[in-house]
C-alpha cells in the first residue's frame, strides 16, 4: 500500500471530521464524518467557500490566520441547512509551502478535546506517533495497546507520562518482539525517510504488519515518525491455507488419471501431464496457445465445435460424449469427454476432462465376441442337427439316384434285345428326377444355413443402413429353430412397416439372443401349450417396434430390475456369462433405439425393441419372387474364376443359351478382354491370386469401352477390407457362392435385356 493510499484510507475511515481548505478559503475536500456533522453531502460541500456558511464577523477572525504556518485553533459558527447555527472548533495546520492547502480538524466547540484523534480508537489498526529526537510519545490509540498487550498503560501513554523507551520496556515484559518497535539503530541516528513496510511474527505466534512514515510537524519533516500496526495473523493463515489448497489441487489435477485441459478463445492455456502423455507431447509449451482443433479427429470436428459453443458461448455443460483425439504422430484414440464453463485466471474459459476409453472399448469388443462364441456354442447342437438332416437325405437320394440310373441303364440295355416298349423307363426317370430335386432342395437348405452362420460371425465394424427388420428376424428364427420347436409354438405377426436404420448383423444377434432366452424360459416337452410370439409393428412416427414374447416362467421384480446389468444371470454357473442382455441393450442403444422389458412371475415376459426408421423409409411389403426369363438374345459371355470346376459349372449353366469363354486367372482375362472380342457379360471372381477380379475391373474401366459396366462379380463371402470397400463402391451385380441357376440367369437377363416371350 502506497503512502497516498494509506493516508486516504485513514482520511475516509476516521470518525473525526477533517477538512482540506484552499488558501482562499474554498473547501477542497471533506471526509464523511464532517458531512455528517454539518448535515450536508460531500458533493454539495466541494468547491464552496467558507464565507457561504460562516458569519462575516467569525470569518474575519478565522481568515486572519489562514496563512500562518503554525497550528492555530479558532471557533466560529456554521449555518446549518435549517438556518440554525452550529458552533465549531477549527484546528488548522498549514505547510511551509504556500501553494499547499490547509489541513483542518473540526469538532463541536462545546466538546472537550481530551486527546487528539479520539475517533481513531475505533480504527482496526494501531497508531503510534513518536518524536524521534526526544523519544516522546505524542499519540497512541486503543488498538495499539490491545495489539501489544499494554491496555493498562493506555491512559498514562496518552497523557505523555511514558517515553518511547519505557513503552518498549513494557512490551518486553509482554514477551513480544520489541525490536519491531525500535525506531533506529541508535537514538542519535536518523531514520530512513518515506514509507516503510514490513512484518514480524511475535513470540505468541501472531503476525503484525507495520507501516511507518515520517510526519511533518512545524516544518520538521524528519523529526516525527508515525506507525500503523495491523494484526494479519488470520489473513496470513488464510492465505497459507489457500496456497496449500491450491498446491494440493494442482497436484490432484497433475496426477489425475483423466486428461484435463483448459482453453479460452479456443486455444490451450493449460494441459495436465496425463493429457500430454496421451497426445504424445513432452513439454506443455508445445501445446500452449495452439488451437484446440489440432487434437480433434477430422470426422469429429463438427461435433466438438457444437460442444465448445455450448460451453463457451451458452455457458452450459457439454455433456459426456465420445470424442476421438489426434495424437502428435497422427494416430488417434477414443475418449469420453465433458466440457465445463469456468472462470480461469480472471477470464471466461472451459475446462475439459477426457478419459481414454480405448482399452475399455477393446475389452467390450472382446466380451462381445466372447458372448458370440458362447451363443454359438449354445446353438452348436441345433446347427449340427439342421445341417445333418438335409445332408442325410441329400446323400441318400443321390445314392438312390445313382442306383436308379444304373438300373435304368441295365434295363435299356436289355430292351435292346426285346424292344424299348417292354421297359417302364418313363416312370423310372420320373422317380429319379424326384430324388434329384429333393437332393437339390436339401443342398439349398445347407447353403442357407452356412449363409446364416456367416451372418452371425461378422466381426467387421458396425455399418448402419436401411434394413428390412424381418430379414434379421427370420435369420434369428432359423438359427434358433432347434431350441424353439421342442418348447413352444412360434407365432409370427409381421405388419407392414418402414425399413429401419440399423446394422442388420447386430439386430440378428440381438433377436437371436432374445429368442434363445425366451425358449429357455419355457420347459421342454409341452410345446403345444406354450407360445413364443414375434410381433413387428409400427410405433409412433419414425419408430418401428419388435416384440419378442413368451409364455414362460416370467421374472420377479428383483430380477426384472437388474435384467440388463452386466454379469447378472439367474442361470447356473457355467451356463451363462450374464452379458447377453447387457450387450443387447448396448447394441440397440448404439443403433439409436431402445430395449425395454415387462414381465410377471408365472405370466411370461415381453421384450420390446424400439428402432428408428431409415431416412425416407417406406413400408416394406413381401417382395414377389422374380421368375427367370424364358427367352433372351444369344450373347457372348466371359467367365473368370481361378477354380476350374467353378468355371466349368458356370459354362454348363450358361452354355445352353450363350457362347461362353472360360479363363482361370487375371492375366488371361486381361489378354482376352483386350483382344477386341465383343463380350456382352463378364462373370468375374472377386478374389484370385495374382491379379484379382478387382484389378481386372479397374484396368478395364480405365479403357472406357463400357465393358466394365457388364461385370457380374462372384463372391465367396469372405471379404478383405479392400474387397468390402470395393463392393460398396461399384454398382455392378453381385452373386454369392454357392450360386444357383436362377440367380445366374437373372443376372444375365438384366444385362442382355430378357424378353418375357416363350422360347
Image (spheres, helix red, strand yellow):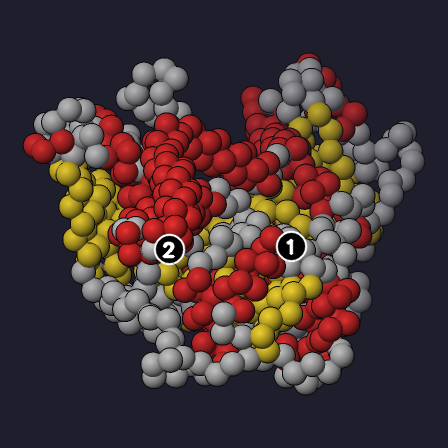
| Observer-nearest of 334 and 580 | 580
- Residue underneath mark 2: 592
Seen at 44% across and 81% down, the residue is: 632
Rendered location of residue 289, percent (x, y):
74, 59
User: Callout 2 environment at 10 Å: few (<14), some (14 to 19), or many (20+)?
Assistant: few
Seen at 73% across and 33% down, the residue is: 199
- Measured Cα–Cα span from mark 2 to mark 1: 47 Å
Please, is residue 540 above or below residue 563 in the view?
below
Q: Give the structural element (helix, strand or loop) at label 2.
A: loop
Instruction: Say if mark 2 contacts mark 1, CB within 8 Å.
Output: no
User: Callout 1 environment at 10 Å: few (<14), some (14 to 19), or many (20+)?
Assistant: some
Labels 2 and 1: the sequence-earlier one: 2
Rendered location of residue 231, percent (x, y):
62, 33
Res. 644 mark: 1
- In the rendered image, is residue 661 in sight? yes
Please, is residue 614 above or below residue 435 in the view?
below
Res. 557 mark: none
Left/right placement of residue 484 relative to residue 331 reads left
| Observer-nearest of 643 and 51 | 643
Please, is residue 362 above or below residue 661 in the view?
above
- In the rendered image, is residue 55 in sight? no
Q: Give the structural element (helix, strand or loop) at label 1.
A: helix
| Observer-nearest of 707 and 218 | 707
Quarter assignment of residue 30: bottom right
Rendered location of residue 705, percent (x, y):
68, 85
Left/right placement of residue 744 relative to residue 612 reads right
Amino acid at each position: 500500500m502506497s503512502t497516498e493510499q494509506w493516508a486516504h484510507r485513514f482520511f475516509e475511515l476516521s470518525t473525526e471530521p477533517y477538512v482540506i481548505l484552499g488558501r482562499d478559503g474554498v473547501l477542497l475536500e471533506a471526509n464523511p464524518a464532517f458531512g455528517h456533522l454539518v448535515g450536508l453531502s460531500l458533493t454539495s460541500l466541494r468547491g464552496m467557500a467558507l464565507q457561504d456558511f460562516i458569519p462575516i464577523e467569525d470569518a474575519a477572525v478565522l481568515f486572519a490566520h489562514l496563512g500562518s504556518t503554525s497550528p492555530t485553533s479558532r471557533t466560529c459558527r456554521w449555518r446549518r441547512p435549517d438556518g440554525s447555527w452550529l458552533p465549531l472548533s477549527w484546528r488548522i495546520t498549514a505547510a511551509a509551502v504556500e501553494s499547499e492547502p490547509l489541513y483542518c480538524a473540526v469538532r463541536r466547540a462545546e466538546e472537550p478535546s481530551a486527546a487528539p484523534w479520539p475517533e481513531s480508537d475505533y480504527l482496526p489498526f494501531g497508531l503510534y506517533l513518536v518524536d524521534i529526537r526526544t523519544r516522546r510519545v505524542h499519540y497512541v490509540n486503543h488498538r495499539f495497546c490491545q495489539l501489544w498487550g499494554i491496555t493498562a498503560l493506555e491512559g498514562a501513554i496518552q497523557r505523555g507520562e511514558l517515553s518511547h523507551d519505557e513503552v518498549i520496556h513494557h512490551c518486553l515484559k509482554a514477551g513480544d518482539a520489541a525490536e519491531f518497535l525500535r525506531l533506529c539503530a541508535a537514538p542519535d541516528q536518523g531514520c530512513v525517510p518515506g514509507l516503510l513496510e514490513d512484518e514480524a511474527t511475535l513470540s505468541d505466534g501472531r503476525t503484525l504488519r507495520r507501516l511507518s512514515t515520517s510526519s511533518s510537524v512545524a516544518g520538521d519533516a524528519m523529526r516525527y515518525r508515525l506507525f500503523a500496526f495491523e494484526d494479519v495473523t488470520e489473513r496470513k493463515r488464510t492465505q497459507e491455507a489457500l496456497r496449500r489448497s491450491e498446491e494440493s489441487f494442482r497436484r490432484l489435477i497433475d496426477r489425475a488419471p483423466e486428461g484435463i485441459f483448459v482453453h479460452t478463445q479456443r486455444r490451450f492455456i493449460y494441459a495436465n501431464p496425463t493429457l500430454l502423455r496421451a497426445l504424445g507431447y513432452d513439454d506443455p509449451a508445445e501445446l500452449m496457445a495452439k488451437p484446440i482443433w489440432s487434437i480433434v479427429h477430422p470426422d469429429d470436428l463438427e461435433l466438438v465445435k457444437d460442444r465448445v459453443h455450448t460451453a463457451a458461448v451458452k455457458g452450459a455443460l457439454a455433456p459426456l460424449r465420445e470424442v476421438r483425439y489426434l495424437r502428435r504422430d497422427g494416430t488417434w484414440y477414443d475418449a469420453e469427454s465433458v466440457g465445463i464453463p469456468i472462470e480461469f485466471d480472471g477470464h471466461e474459459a472451459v475446462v475439459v476432462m477426457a478419459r481414454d476409453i480405448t482399452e475399455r472399448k477393446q475389452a467390450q469388443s472382446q466380451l462381445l465376441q466372447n458372448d458370440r462364441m458362447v451363443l454359438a456354442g449354445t446353438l452348436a447342437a441345433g446347427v449340427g442337427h439342421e445341417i445333418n438332416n438335409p445332408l442325410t437325405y441329400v446323400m441318400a437320394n443321390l445314392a438312390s439316384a445313382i442306383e436308379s440310373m444304373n438300373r435304368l441303364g441295365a434295363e435299356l440295355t436289355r430292351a435292346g434285345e426285346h424292344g424299348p416298349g417292354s421297359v417302364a423307363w418313363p416312370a423310372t426317370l420320373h422317380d429319379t428326377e424326384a430324388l434329384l430335386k429333393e437332393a437339390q432342395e436339401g443342398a439349398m437348405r445347407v447353403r442357407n444355413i452356412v449363409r446364416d452362420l456367416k451372418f452371425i460371425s461378422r466381426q467387421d465394424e458396425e455399418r448402419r443402413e436401411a434394413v428390412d427388420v424381418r430379414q434379421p428376424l427370420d435369420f434369428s428364427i432359423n438359427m434358433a429353430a432347434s431350441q424353439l420347436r421342442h418348447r413352444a409354438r412360434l407365432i409370427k405377426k409381421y405388419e407392414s412397416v418402414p425399413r429401419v436404420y440399423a446394422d442388420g448383423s447386430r439386430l440378428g444377434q440381438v433377436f437371436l439372443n432374445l429368442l434363445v432366452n425366451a425358449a429357455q424360459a419355457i420347459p421342454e416337452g409341452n410345446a403345444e401349450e406354450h407360445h413364443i410370439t414375434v410381433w413387428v409393428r409400427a410405433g409412433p412416427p419414425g419408430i418401428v417396434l419388435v416384440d419378442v414374447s413368451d409364455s414362460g416362467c416370467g421374472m420377479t421384480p428383483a430380477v426384472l430390475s437388474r435384467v440388463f446389468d452386466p454379469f447378472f444371470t439367474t442361470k447356473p454357473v457355467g451356463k451363462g456369462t450374464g452379458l447377453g442382455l447387457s450387450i443387447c441393450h448396448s447394441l440397440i442403444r448404439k443403433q439409436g433405439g431402445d430395449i425395454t422389458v415387462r414381465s410377471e412371475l408365472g405370466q411370461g415376459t415381453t421384450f420390446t425393441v424400439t428402432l428408428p426408421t431409415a431416412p425416407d423409409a417406406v413400408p416394406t411389403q413381401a417382395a414377389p419372387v422374380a421368375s427367370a426369363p424364358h427367352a433372351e438374345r444369344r450373347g457372348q459371355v466371359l467367365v473368370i474364376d481361378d477354380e476350374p470346376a467353378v468355371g466349368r459349372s458356370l459354362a454348363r449353366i450358361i452354355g445352353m443359351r450363350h457362347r461362353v469363354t472360360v479363363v482361370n486367372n487375371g492375366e488371361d482375362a486381361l489378354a482376352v478382354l483386350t483382344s477386341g472380342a465383343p463380350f456382352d457379360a463378364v462373370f468375374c471372381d472377386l478374389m484370385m491370386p495374382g491379379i484379382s477380379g478387382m484389378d481386372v475391373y479397374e484396368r478395364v474401366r480405365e479403357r472406357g469401352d463400357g465393358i466394365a459396366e457388364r461385370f457380374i462379380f462372384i463372391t465367396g463371402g469372405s471379404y478383405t477390407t479392400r474387397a468390402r470397400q470395393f463392393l460398396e463402391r461399384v454398382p455392378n451385380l453381385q452373386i454369392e457362392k454357392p450360386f444357383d441357376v436362377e440367380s445366374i440367369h437373372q443376372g444375365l437377363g438384366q444385362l442382355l435385356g430378357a424378353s418375357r416371350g416363350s422360347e
